[in-house]
Amino acid sequence: MWSLESPQLYTLKSSVKSGDEIVDETETPFGIRTAVFDVNKGFFLDGVSTKLKGVCIHHDAGSLGAAVPDKVLERRLRLLKEIGVNAIRTSHNPPDPELLNLCDQLGFLVMDESLDEFTPGKNKWVTGWNNGVPGHFGYSEMFDQWAVTDVSDMVRRDRNHPSIILWSIGNEVDYANDPFSDPALGENYRPENPPATDLLKCAAPLVAAVKSLDRTRPVTAALANIQMSDAVGLPELLDAVGYNYQEARYAADHVKFPKRIIYGSENGQQYAAWEAVETNDFISGQFLWTGIDYLGEANTWPNRANGAGLLDLCGFKKPIGWFRQSLWSDKPMVYLCVPGAPLNRRFNAAEHWNWPSNTIVNVACYANCPEVTLTLNGKIIGTKKSSEAVDGVLNWQVPFEPGTLKAVGRVNGQDVCEFVLQTAGAPSRVELFPDTTQLHADGKDVCHVEFRIVDDNGVRVPDADAEVKFELNGPAKILGLGNGDLSNSENCQGDTHRAFHGCGLAILQTTTMPGSIVLQAKAPGLQPASVILQSR
């Protein structure tokens, strides 16, 4: 059976013959599994109760834009898997087929999504969300002619993927007054807008198209305003109803609509949003917004990307990614950081131990172990049990002194994991960390090379932003450079890029020629670094 832990795949070979001659053939990978949504008990994969620990992802990959090699997708998915993610929502369009292939191979469940609007279209904000005069051109201009065809093509193309468990016909198509409205909105009702009953006219043909091609999977939509959608009967067209940021409605709606399958189709990172899943058997899971930072949906220039992800634009794990790992991963882990803004303490946090003298530092610890001990330069600060966590976080107030801050996680009294923050000195050198040194000379293979600015002891310097220049020799090219900074506007396809918080990422791609590849990195006033790769 195909499962999350053991995604067993088989291959069906189909041949067309004319007499004894094979005139065409193809191979189709597939997996065998059962996927069932129960209205009271949630989701079951192969008969096993399974919470959907999902994330929404967009199609871009930071410095590479929308042209993303398979190896880049694979690295990002493996990092999400490490966090404990087991489900992907392809927001808000049919994905690259290679993403689905990788989900099949690595063991992810998928909500395959088609459209972000019906017709008329949503507002497209250029100068800022709800700011200025919006545009309206978009898919809505082609909806009547192409929507049924496009949704049908998505199902035909993707229906042999065992990873797919839901077909989504739309995202937030019921967003209040964007454009549809209904008296159910009360004082926010705008009678001059298209009536919300038109949602049914748009959705019904799409649901019918999906069911004509695949009756084995539920049809769903990610709904933004359940109140309005209920008033016109949109959820009744769906097999499973996605709630976007409406956890407060779960319990009452489960009673009011006892036959409705409810899950979180788009959710914030707040601990309470996960508690609403964990403590209610009838909620199948959630999809966080988002798994990875993505280009667009940004604020004022030079901000160019959205920073809601567990991973940044480079695919580096952010503090909020570590926090989610403490909630979702079964592998013992512990992590330390120093929260930033008081109202956003988990999302804006610093992973370093460089602070002013004579200050008291609030240290946050994310762990999935029953017990954690914190030490500073070998002296015990304290030991706390998981039951003492507030909203999933252990906290200590620590008088700062330079050195080594260390957390050790314990299970049954045994040390099982640790995490260390060390005080960094002045920048000394550049270091390179490739994710592989052996590549294929196929013109497609990729190596991710993290570059760091470190001190004499190899500790990353958290405020280092040196400009690093790369020299590449051999059968490869620099595909992209980045550093995860949402407001960085440097050329991502050049040979020079600044570090951000002391690090960044260079992505190399092979040519079709074999040979040695040498990457050198230099920065003013720092010792250079080099790495040798082999392409065969």
Image (cartoon, grey):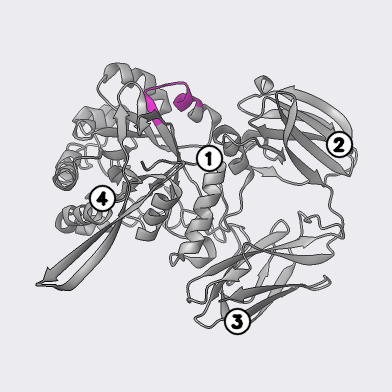
Residue, disc 3 = 515
Name the residue beneath numbered marker 2: 376
Q: How far apart are labels 1 and 4 at the CA level?
A: 25 Å
Q: Quadrant of the C terminus?
A: bottom right
Q: Earlier in the sequence, mark 3 or mark 2?
A: 2
For badge 3, the amino acid type reads: Gly
Front residue (pair 307, 283): 283
Reading the chain from its start, which is encountered first: label 3 or label 4? 4
Mark 1 lies on a secondary structure that is loop
Badge 4 marks a residue whose secondary structure is loop
Within the image, what quadrant is residue 211 found in?
top left
- How busy is the neighbourhood of tag 3: few (under 14 within 10 Å), some, or many (20 plus)? some
Residue shown at 15% from the left, 41% from the top? 204
> Residue visible at 50% across and 63% down?
71
Residue, disc 4? 159
Provide residue 50's location: percent of width, then percent of height: 42, 31
Q: Which residue position is annotated with label 1?
A: 84
Q: Earlier in the sequence, mark 2 or mark 1?
A: 1
Which residues fall within the magenta stretch? 275-284
